[in-house]
Image (cartoon, grey):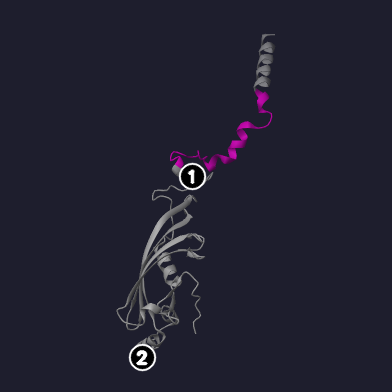
Amino acid sequence: MNRLDHRDPLVFDTHELGRRPGALRKVSRTLEAPEGLGIIDVIGVPEKSEIELDLRLESVVEGVLVTGTAGTVVEGECVRCLEPVEFDLDVDFQELYYYPESDERHRARTSGTEDLDEDSENETYRLEGDFFDLQPVLRDAVVLALPLQPVCQEDCLGLCSECGARLSDDPAHHHDAADPRWAALQGLSAAPGDEGDGTKNSGTREGLAENQEK
């Protein structure tokens, strides 16, 4: 039973290939990016932004071999200074979509020689009727091509730990750091009432001088 929606722009029809090994079809399509195409909260393709796809669909004995490229723009945030990051991204991918009966034979052969875990089985893509869904393959290709720690520029200096200023805008930016060993003495240098001490002391000295003259 076909569960794929043929109206989905990332679902493709292989009916024209007719299961004839060697049959070839090329497809170009511009479509809107689905949600979550990238590394969540780090960098990725903005939802509904344009993706340009160029695909080569080739019928082989076991299914349809899909080879393609995708071009789009990715956006994120610099991990050092939090400035926006944006650049063009082009990815290549290739995947074999098995005919249902071919996939069963494939799993029967491999199960006799090695134990396939659940992840290995999930990596096998299958045709549903004449349709295949490109989204999981495209998602994997994009995610693998993205930087895990995007930066606005390779030599980004990040942010000042004291005030948060962007250091690349002012490489000479700095703060005078006080010696913590003298912090307890800073309050003693200007105790309350010290402002008038100079006048008081001066008057006292003059009084002592007069008494000595007498």
Q: Residue furthest front?
A: 16
x then y, percent, for residue 116 = 40, 84
x then y, percent, for residue 142 = 42, 65
Q: Residue at x 44, y 68 (%)?
A: 139
Residue at which label 1 appears: 166
Closest to the observer, 27 or 184: 27
Closest to the observer, 86 or 42: 86
- Above or below, 69 relative to 156: below
- Above or below, 146 relative to 12: above
Q: Over which residues does the magenta segment extend?
A: 169-197
Q: Residues within 10 Å of mark 1 (few under 14, many from 20)?
A: some
Res. 141 mark: none
N-term mark: 1 or 2: 2
The three-letter code of the residue at mark 1 reads Arg
Q: Residue at x 51, y 43 (%)?
A: 165
Q: Residue at x 36, y 81 (%)?
A: 18
The three-letter code of the residue at mark 2 reads Gly
